Image (cartoon, rainbow, N blue to C red):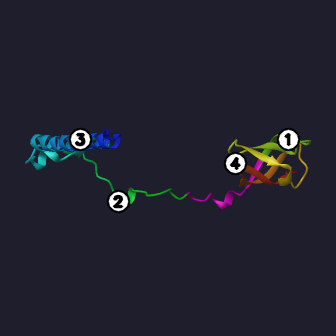
Amino acid sequence: MGKSKETVNKKETEKKKQKKKKDKEQKRLDRKANAKEGNSLDDMIMYVDEDGNFTSTPPDPTKKRKINEEDIVIGVPKQEAEEPADVVRKGKVTFFNDSKGYGFIKDIETQESVFVHLNGLIDRITENDKVTFEVEMGMKGPNAVSVKLVD
């Protein structure tokens, strides 16, 4: 009887394992022989320049900037609330569509155009009417509310 295939395959796989082991040992010895031992500390130090990039040269002391701890802000800065004294504004209706129920009012002082909806009206308005209104922030920007006609 002849030899079974399993024994041949087992011998081949064993040879491959031995060869792989020898190659790995050879690579380890090569790395060990070519390693730079005894590097000085100066050779291993990296510096960061003023733009935040790594460099091997030390930074120029004349370019050094002094930063105050109070100037460093971590997170989102708080927004200051607007002055409540300027709540009621005066303006002129530049556009108003009765069928759709919205329009725009131009603030007389700031020349800012503010959206107005039918729900924010106290009096019925038309184009070119002079009005007083308050501003609230809506989902898409400032909205005019409590809109009254000026006599």
Screen quadrant of the N terminus: top left
Checking the image for residue 15, the label placed there is 3
Vertical side of 120 occupied by 52: above or below: above
Please tell me which of labels 2 and 4 falls first in the chain. 2
In the figure, is residue 67 to the left or right of 129? Answer: left
Does 11 sit left or right of 146 as displayed?
left
Instruction: Quadrant for residue 79, please give it.
Output: bottom right
Residue 147 numbered tag: none
Q: CA distance from mark 1 to mark 3?
A: 89 Å
| Type of the residue with mark 3 | Lys
Task: Estimate how packed mark 2 is, as few (under 14), some (14 to 19) or many (20 or more) residues with alpha carbons within 10 Å.
Answer: few
Marks 1 and 2, the one that precedes in the sequence: 2
Front-most of residues 94 and 136: 136
Question: SS for tag 1?
Answer: strand
Depth order, front residue of 20/120 = 20
Label drawn at residue 141: 4
Question: Where does label 1 land, which residue?
Answer: 96
The residue to which callout 2 is attached is: 69
Name the residue at 43% across, 58% down.
74
Spatial separation of the CA atoms under disc 4 and disc 1: 18 Å
Cα distance in 3D space between marks 2 and 4: 35 Å
Mark 3 or mark 2: which comes first in sequence?
Answer: 3
- Helix, strand or loop at label 2? It is helix
Total labels drawn: 4
Instruction: Measure how far apart labels 3 and 2 are at the Cα level.
Output: 66 Å
